[in-house]
Image: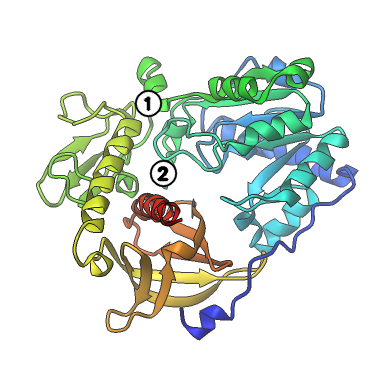
């Protein structure tokens, strides 16, 4: 790594959650904001509520958990119920000075994605002791494929620790209305269903295993399957646009990053294979696919392809010089605390079996060794974030069709093999 990068310091939070309960001003702001959000979202997204009395009649303190399908989830849920919810949110959203002011006022709890965070636990515990409601998304990220992702294991122990009722809100149809890979809202139908996970007495007697099983069952959802069984037309003529941000392998020729979307169709620029997304958000059944007709199956299949490519590269004689992935026009940002990020460098990005390099093609430039990589995650659609030697970085893929998801997938596989090799050497 070059000298300017070495001078950066470890990212620390400089935002403290207020210790006192929310005041009258914050509560009035939340009530007025709820009115505006209901007007903005409920009609536009065709939102319906199911079993909602369960949530409305729940007396704080409690934990509210939900599946995570879009950035609108906290606003939509908060707007349609009467309780003051302290949401746990990715600390990246606090870097805007305006949003930091608002979030501090309404006491949103910051959490560093992908890392253990005792401050977050303390803040949650304090708000519960004050008789408040705390909201979190146990998946830790918004879903790319419409199905509930594996839940963060620490969540189960947290629920046991807090010993307050747990209520789930499941968003059904929300993914189809606004997939993570799309910039387009596709008005269909969204149902918010409230489900009781455990009441106060149940959470006190349940073991971590029972809490785990109940929470996984309560949040389990597949939006493709739900919308197939409960069809409702999507009002959009751009139903496939930017789908290639998630689908990085062509099902026909297995070429990486060859798929290009336009309107309601996506085509392989290499072999010409095409898939159509119909008015219900489903892949046409007459399309030949080597997996089930949904994105969850596509994602599992392409992950296997990625692993095959990586294992082949790891077995090559000159594996440390073989480029596994390449991307032009990438910007690298870094920063300290919750201050706005600053541009550190721009150039071409290359992934090798043991490192990432950002340079201009003539010199290596900045190097990140995988052995020192930590807390890998994606922010929004095209930002890959991580810590390297305790310094925070963000790689921004600037071109609209460039996938950051494939980089996360490849890096996760490489990191797994890197850690396994390290364990075997001990």
- Residue 89 drawn at (x, y percent): 64, 47
Q: Determine crowd level at label 2: few under 14, some 14-19, many 20+ residues with C-alpha closer than 10 A.
A: some
Disc 2 marks which residue?
Answer: 184
Decide if residue 66 is in sight here: yes
**Marks 2 and 1, Cα distance to the nearest angstrom?**
18 Å
Residue depicted at x 74% and y 21%: 203
Q: Determine crowd level at label 1: few under 14, some 14-19, many 20+ residues with C-alpha closer than 10 A.
A: many
Closer-to-camera residue (48/173): 173
Disc 1 marks which residue?
Answer: 224
Closer-to-camera residue (378/55): 378
Q: Secondary structure at mark 2?
A: loop
Residue 198's disc is none
In the figure, residue 277 lies in which quadrant?
top left
Residue depicted at x 32% and y 36%: 300
Classify residue 99 as left or right of residue 200: left
Q: Is residue 21 above or below residue 384?
A: above
Closer-to-camera residue (389/130): 389
Q: Is residue 71 above or below residue 164?
A: below
Classify residue 24 as left or right of residue 218: right
Classify residue 391 as left or right of residue 420: right
User: Which-is-in-front pick, marks 2 and 1?
Assistant: 1
Q: What number of labels is visible?
A: 2
- Residue 247 drawn at (x, y percent): 29, 44
Residue depicted at x 42% and y 68%: 369
């Amino acid at each position: 790594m070059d000298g300017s990068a070495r001078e950066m310091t470890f990212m620390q939070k400089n935002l403290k959650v207020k210790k006192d309960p929310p005041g009258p001003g914050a509560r009035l702001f939340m009530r007025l904001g709820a009115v505006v959000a209901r007007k903005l979202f409920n009609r536009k997204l065709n939102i319906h509520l199911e079993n909602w009395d369960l949530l409305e009649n729940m007396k704080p303190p409690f934990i509210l958990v939900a599946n995570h399908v879009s950035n609108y989830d906290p606003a939509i849920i908060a707007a349609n119920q009467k309780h003051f919810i302290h949401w746990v949110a990715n600390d990246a959203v606090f870097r805007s000075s305006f949003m930091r002011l608002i979030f501090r006022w309404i006491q949103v709890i910051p959490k560093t994605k992908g890392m253990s965070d005792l401050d977050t636990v303390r803040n949650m515990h304090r708000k519960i002791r004050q008789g408040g409601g705390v909201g979190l998304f146990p998946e830790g990220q918004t879903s790319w494929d419409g199905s509930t992702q594996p839940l963060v294991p620490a969540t189960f122990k947290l629920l046991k620790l807090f010993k307050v009722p747990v209520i789930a809100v499941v968003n059904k149809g929300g993914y189809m209305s606004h997939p993570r890979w799309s910039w387009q809202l596709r008005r269909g139908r969204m149902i918010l269903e409230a489900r009781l996970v455990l009441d106060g007495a149940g959470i006190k007697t349940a073991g971590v295993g029972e809490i785990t099983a109940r929470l996984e069952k309560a949040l389990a959802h597949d939006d493709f399957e739900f919308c197939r069984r409960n069809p409702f037309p999507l009002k959009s003529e751009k139903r496939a646009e930017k789908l290639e941000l998630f689908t990085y392998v062509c099902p026909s020729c297995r070429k990486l990053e060859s798929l290009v979307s336009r309107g309601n169709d996506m085509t392989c620029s290499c072999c010409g294979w095409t898939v159509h997304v119909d008015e219900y958000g489903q892949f046409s059944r007459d399309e030949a696919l080597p997996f089930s007709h949904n994105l969850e199956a596509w994602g599992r299949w392409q992950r296997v392809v990625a692993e095959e490519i990586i294992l082949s590269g790891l077995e090559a004689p000159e594996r440390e010089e073989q480029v596994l992935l390449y991307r032009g026009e990438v910007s690298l940002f870094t920063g300290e605390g919750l201050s706005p990020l600053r541009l550190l460098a721009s150039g071409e990005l290359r992934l090798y079996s043991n490192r990432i390099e950002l340079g201009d093609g003539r010199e290596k430039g900045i190097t990140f060794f995988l052995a020192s990589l930590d807390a890998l995650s994606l922010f929004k659609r095209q930002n890959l974030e991580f810590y390297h030697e305790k310094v925070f970085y963000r790689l921004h893929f600037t071109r609209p069709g460039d996938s950051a998801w494939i980089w996360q997938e490849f890096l996760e596989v490489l990191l797994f093999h890197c850690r396994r090799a390290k364990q075997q050497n001990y």
